[in-house]
Amino acid sequence: QVQLVESGGGSVQAGGSLRLSCAASGFYYPYNIYNWGWFRQAPGKDREGVAAIDTDGNTRYGDSVKGRFTIFKDSANSIVYLQMNSLKPEDTATYYCAADRARWFLQAKYDYWGRGTQVTVSS
């Protein structure tokens, strides 16, 4: 059973940092052939692509987080991280991890999704 589990969310003051983790398990194929993405959704808003990394290590970032967020993988390609720095109140949202063998980058078309982790940034 494919499972993605996010962790690391919480509450932080504006200007602070958080690191989100996404642990994958149950993939039929080797972990290193999957592409990854982070998305977020705030109440009343559409789901937004935040960051993505493909099988070759190429990354993409949403305009609102460029220069502040970084996506990276562990050496075994089974854990994906989102380092969030200089957090702003508008970053408040539920953050979701996604994985797929297809290279979707910031398009919300991934086959596999985590349940999400809440990030709240106070002013």
Image: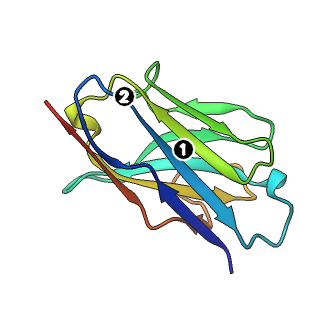
Q: Earlier in the sequence, mark 2 or mark 1?
A: 2
Between the C-alphas of marks 2 and 1, the distance is 13 Å
Vertical arrangement, residue 123 with respect to residue 120, above or below: above
- Residue at the spot of label 1: 106
106 and 13: which one is in front? 13
Percent position of residue 33, x then y: 83, 53
Indicate left or right for 56 with 37 as reference.
Answer: right
Quadrant showing the N terminus = bottom right
Residue 44 visible in the current orientation: yes
Residue type highlighted by circle 1: Leu
Residue drawn at point x = 86 percent, y = 61 percent: 30
- Tag 2 secondary structure: loop
Which image quarter: residue 64? top left
Percent position of residue 49, x then y: 46, 44
Quadrant showing the C terminus = top left
Vertical arrangement, residue 63 with respect to residue 92, above or below: above
Q: Are marks 2 and 1 in contact (CB under 8 Å)?
A: no
- Residue at the spot of label 2: 64
Residue drawn at point x = 81 percent, y = 37 percent: 56
Percent position of residue 84, x then y: 43, 32
Percent position of residue 71, x then y: 58, 35
Residue drawn at point x = 34 percent, y = 22 percent: 86
